[in-house]
Image: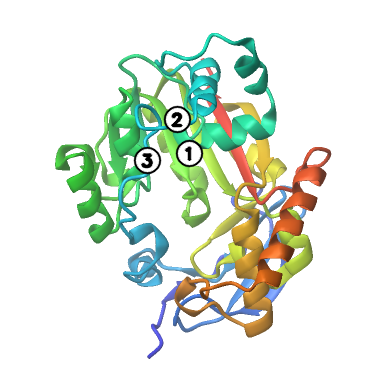
Amino acid sequence: MKTFIKTVPNKYCQICKKNGLILYFSLSDKFFNNSGRWNILYCKKCKISWIDPIPINSDTGKLYPANYRTNINNGKIKRIFGNIKDRIVASILCYKFGYQYSADSLGLWNLLSKITIVKDYIGRRISWVEFKKNGKLLDIGCGTGGFIEEMKKLGWNVTGIEIDKKAANIAKLRVGSEFIINRQLKESNLLEASYDVITLLHVFEHLSQPIDTLKICLKLLKPDGKIVINTPNINSLGHILFKKNWMPLEVPRHFFLYSPKGLRECIESVNLEVQEMWTSTYISNFVWNTSIIIKRRGNLTNGRLPEPLSLSHKATSLLFKIIETILNIFVPVGEEVILIAKKKC
């Protein structure tokens, strides 16, 4: 039985307020059994895209079934320090991000930490957040709490916001109920100028009012505070190849999608200053695997990959990753945009 979603028109760019151009017409939910058809519009000036119509706020919960990937407790993520065997990883986290660890005093690790792909893959473990003693971190859309659990162990004072009740309850078990807020950000009653870092990790694309959310984040950040965002890249090689079958379109859960330029426009529109931005190929295998199945079958049953994948499927996925990684050295075609911005003083 299909789930009916109430919607409202969403014709205008959030940044310049101009009418969007149609990029794709009449797309359906290729992951779950939600009824409805959605267009994807595009702003040629601001380089962002969005769905039209957009689900009303009271119906957004219907878009995420219990088996949606962020609602599942996958257990503890790999410990960064202590149990980790790879001293290279720990050393780079020490040199590049300042985490306390008795690292090997070899300049090689410091050199490696300056390479973008190394910084991307290893820094992802701590979401590129540099260590700050007694620092306060807010994770918006914390899911089941795996990230903030690890950051809490590494010395951060953490707070997580998660609107899904089931996911929030799991997060409370992991880090303590006092650290999790099961409400919308605008209803959270958090103190202004109280956070050193705010993270939105594959959350920004799910926001119906991204500019308003950034304005709230700006108020919550300390004068030298930072915001970290990672989100799908609408200019990625995967999107170029798969077009309407590109998995990260994920209609109707992804409300807005960004190019690097578009994400910068959003950030700078609210008086945040971009410090670093790059595109990553980290999830390119997953994007290829899911997109090729959507292209061939028309959908991805329950949002899950079939198991096992064929040898030829794995081989083409690996080839795609290699090609995208090489191209990404010269042009930003990775599947994700990662951005670190600072509050202007």
Residue at 38% x, 83% y is: 3
Between 18 and 214, the residue placed more toward the observer is: 214
Residue 214 has which mark?
A: 1
Q: Position of residue 53 (x, y in %)?
A: 54, 71
> Callout 3: helix, strand or loop?
helix
Q: Is any atom of residue 14 visible in this view?
A: yes
Between 242 and 104, the residue placed more toward the observer is: 104
Q: Quadrant of residue 28?
A: bottom right
Q: Which quadrant of the figure contains the N terminus?
A: bottom left
Q: CA distance from mark 2 to mark 3?
A: 22 Å
**Disc 3 target residue:** 147
For the residue marked with disc 1, what is the amino acid?
Leu
Between 291 and 112, the residue placed more toward the observer is: 112
> Callout 1: helix, strand or loop?
helix
Q: Which comes sooner in the sequence, label 1 or label 3? A: 3
Q: Position of residue 301 (x, y in %)?
A: 49, 80
Q: Quadrant of residue 145?
A: top left
- Is mark 2 in CB contact (under 8 Å) with mark 1? yes
**Disc 2 target residue:** 218
